[in-house]
Amino acid sequence: MKLKNKLLTIGLPVVAASMLLFTAKALYHPAREVATPIISPASYEQSQRIAGIGIVEPKSEVINIGTHISGIVQQVHVKLGQHVKAGDSLFSIDDREVKAQLDNAFARLASAKTALDDATTELSFYEKIANSNAISPQELSNKRFAVKRARTLVKETQTAINEFQTTLSRLTVKAPIAGEILRLNIRVGEYANEGKLNDGFVVLGDTSVLHVRVEIDESDAQRLKQHAMAKGALRSDGGHMVPLTFVRLEPLIKAKRSLSGDSNERVDTRVLEVIYTFDKAQLLAYPGQQMDVFIDDNLA
């Protein structure tokens, strides 16, 4: 009994001290070291400014090229980074079936023309003897109808040939403008489906001049002055700020295209899109890169 009381006398203070130490350790939060960013963010000394996030894009904007007709890709005529002229071939859909139909149509046209020549010759003969009572008016009418039917068949076959030739030309997709091939999303042997695409089979753009499409929050839209001084820096090089030149704005306020995923971001954010350009000699940039843009409230 005495031993039990002695253990309780010693044990309880030890347990209490252990719990106190554990509680103190749980409540203690050492000061965290402030991490230094690998890349310094862009900053601008002007206090009165409008800030926005921009996306570098070609002068022509990004053009997603699709196909007029679905089918298996037979040949890709371009490579990534290649500069093409308007009208240059980009890729071709398998044309064997259309060519076979076209050859068949030409054969039908030749047969129809022969039938028309025979019917015309026969009608001419019958018209010469029509007054001699050697044939009846009904027979002469039938011969005239035969010529008319043969002539119609020739026209229909020629129309079919024109349609096949048009289809054949549309199986080769051509560049609508001069520009640079930015992406190839199609390979020989793959199936290309016609219709609206999120990503084109070939992505094309005029990169001779680069633009920056800047999203300005609608709350700042009234403060924006079109020809105010603006500067921007790529996210990958925040310390290199270059001047921007106003090109145009798109006056329709629209929903923000890309959200950052932050929990405090408003999903109903609406923005005004403003397009600027910059000197490519001052900044090496690629379409699709993000840029931090700052616009003065006052005119330069």
Image: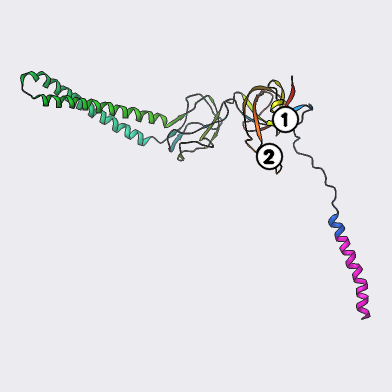
* Quarter of the figure with residue 251: top right
> For numbered disc 1, what is the local secondary structure?
strand
The range drawn in magenta is: 1-22
Q: Is residue 129 visible?
A: no
Mark 1 = which residue? 51
- Residue 91 is left or right of residue 46, and the answer is left
**Alpha carbon of mark 2 to alpha carbon of mark 1: how far?**
17 Å
Q: Quadrant of the N terminus?
A: bottom right
How far across and how far down the image is residue 293, in percent? 71, 29
Query: Looking at the image, which residue is at 11% across and 22% down?
Result: 126
Q: Quadrant of the C terminus?
A: top right
Tell me the tag on residue 173. none
> For numbered disc 2, what is the local secondary structure?
loop
**The residue positioned farthest toward the bottom in the image shown:** 1
**Given the image, on which type of amino acid does mark 1 rest?**
Ala
How far across and how far down the image is residue 99, in percent? 34, 33
Query: Looking at the image, which residue is at 15% across and 22% down?
Result: 121
**Given the image, on which type of amino acid does mark 2 rest?**
Arg
Mark 2 = which residue? 266
Q: How packed is label 1: few (under 14 Cα within 10 Å), some, or many (20 or more)? A: many
Observer-nearest of 37 and 299: 299
- Residue 254 is left or right of residue 16, and the answer is left
Query: Looking at the image, which residue is at 38% across and 31% down?
Result: 167
How far across and how far down the image is residue 190, in percent? 46, 40
Q: Is residue 87 above or below residue 188?
A: above
